Amino acid sequence: MPSRTARRRAMAFALAASLPLAATLAGGQPADAVQAPDAAVRTAADPGTGCLVPELGGLRLRVAKTELEWANCRLGAVHSRHAAAWKRGFVLEQQYAPDTVLRAGHRVGVTIGR
């Protein structure tokens, strides 16, 4: 499984690649001269990108909130549910499935073990 950093880079590129590369390549530039669109270097707070929901299962609440902010989402309702001792404090469920594309700033609810 790729590292979290590699998945972040892939998410940023997937959101930034909204302009088709085929149109860029049809302009007559060689394939190695084509650079990634400027959108690939946008920050998480940039409203121009959508919200690509990350995998939050197994993360602490604080880390999950950081992941959501990086993916241009916001933390929604936080519910708690009884869990085994080793699952307490970790995300058990999330409202939307990973890799779901939502509008920028959309809230994603989570369930934490208590």
Image (cartoon, rainbow, N blue to C red):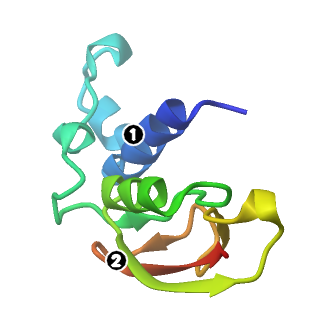
Q: Residue at x 25, y 24 (%)?
A: 35
Q: Position of residue 56 (x, y in %)?
A: 58, 60
Q: Nearer the viewer, residue 75 or 33?
A: 75
Relative to 86, does residue 108 appear above or below in the rendering?
A: below
Q: Which mark is residue 88?
A: none
Q: Secondary structure at mark 1?
A: helix
The amino acid on which the numbered mark 2 sits, given as a three-letter code, is Arg
Q: Which residue is mark 1?
A: 22
Q: Residue at x 25, y 20 (%)?
A: 29
Q: Position of residue 80 (x, y in %)?
A: 62, 84
The amino acid on which the numbered mark 1 sits, given as a three-letter code, is Ala
For marks 1 and 2, the one nearer the N-term is: 1
Relative to 31, does residue 1 appear above or below in the rendering?
A: below
Relative side of 40 to 21, left or right: left
Q: Which residue is mark 2?
A: 103
> Where on the picture, by quarter, is residue 77?
bottom left
Quarter of the rendering occupied by the N terminus: top right
User: Which tag is nearer the camera, tag 1 or tag 2?
Assistant: 2
Relative side of 80 to 16, left or right: right
Q: Residue at x 57, y 87 (%)?
A: 79
Q: Position of residue 15 (x, y in %)?
A: 37, 53
Q: Secondary structure at mark 2?
A: loop
Relative side of 53 to 17, left or right: right
Q: Few, some or many C-alpha atoms within 10 Å of disc 2 (few <14, some 14-19, many ≥20)?
A: some
